[in-house]
Amino acid sequence: MIKRIVIVLLALAVILGTVFGIKVKQFRQMEEMLAQPQPPAVITATEALEEHWQPSLQAAGSLVAVNGTDVTTEIGGIISSIRFESGQTVKAGDVLLQLEASVDKAALDGAKAERRLSEVQLERAMDLIKRKAISTSDYDSAKASFDAAQANMAEKAAKLAQKTIRAPFAGSLGIRDINLGEYLSPGSRIVNLQALNPIYVDYALPERYLRELAVDQTVEVQIAAYPEQVFKGKIEAIESGIDRNTRSISLRAILDNSAGLLRPGMFADVSTVLPEADVVVTVPRTAISFSTYGDFLYVIEKGEGDVLIAKRRQVETGRTQQGRVIVTKGLKPGEQVVRTGLVKLRDGIPIVIDNSIELNDSEAPQE
């Protein structure tokens, strides 16, 4: 029994020794591979530039029509004719809709007849009172009857006019919500009407910027639908008070929209341009790696034997404009930095510059 145990133990020792030896050999091979010099990383490079930037205050806003409303009806009725098409441009006063009005027309005709009769009776009373053939009270009664008939006719005419729905202002119509022969109750939505040129952009800025804001100050607006285009306008109004909940001040700017590209409700990136220009150091947006532990970039330096290396440097950044970022601290004008290729870099790694290629930095290094 003891002999068998000894044999088993010896076999296990041989197996474990063999496995241990194989692992040691694998570790030594891995160390040798890691000890070998890595090939230089290929990157593109650029210089930090000193530029004059027009300072601006950034905010998010929304486009608002100068005039915009849902066209409705004051009075109920059946639609007898529709005089517009969805998306049509209309002028103020254009007829959009006609409700069935035969009863109202008949009522107005009756009111006109009553007015004519009361007018004749009043004229007769005026003639008789001059001759003192009737009393003053009889004349007053005839005058009151005429005034009541005239007011009744005006009321019937106003009700008839309400059966014709007109555009309250010039603008562009949306998609109609009604159909021919449909009954409309008072207040029913017919179509949306928006005045599109010019157009407002409403936004807000923190109260600390109040002294830097003024009416007619230039604003630049960018819209997601037209990312390459900048729409310019001017501040038209500044709110008279500060919002006590957000401690911000509301502003309204006006933009030209003669091309018809802008629509109410669009989200807008608004830049309020300040009068004095700043001298700043900038680099391309792709040269900066934004991290929760701080922003950094790679500066290109010469190592041993004139080999180029990438040195990681912590920086502080500011505003972004047209693909470039202000570096407020940590970089000097003229220093050469890595523009693209950051994803494969680490501090001190050898690099090769090849600006003839365009590298993809869609995955920025994270810390």
Image (tube, rainbow, N blue to C red):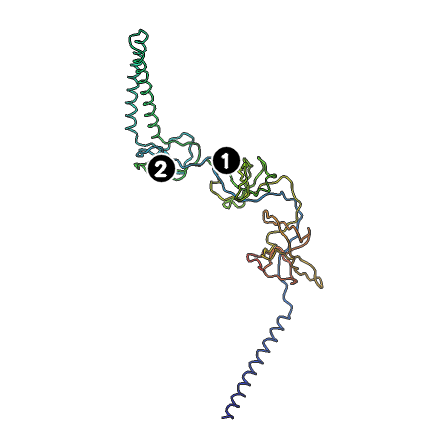
Please say whether residue 258 is visible from this viewpoint. no
Residue 100 versus residue 227 in the image, above or below: above
Pointer 2 residue: 188
Residue 190 percent location from the top left of the image: 37, 37
Answer with left or right where residue 10 lies relative to residue 148: right
Residue 315 versus residue 64 in the image, above or below: below
Precedes in sequence: disc 2 or disc 1: 2
Pointer 1 residue: 198
Label 1 neighbourhood size at 10 Å, few (<14), some (14-19), many (20+)?
Answer: some
Total residue callouts: 2
Question: Disc 2 residue type?
Answer: Ser
Answer with left or right where residue 122 lies relative to residue 59: left
Please tell me in which quadrant of the rendered image residue 277 appears. Answer: top right
Helix, strand or loop status at disc 1? strand
Residue 76 percent location from the top left of the image: 32, 34
Question: Disc 1 residue type?
Answer: Pro
Q: Give the farthest residue toward the right.
A: 305
Residue 322 versus residue 39 in the image, above or below: above
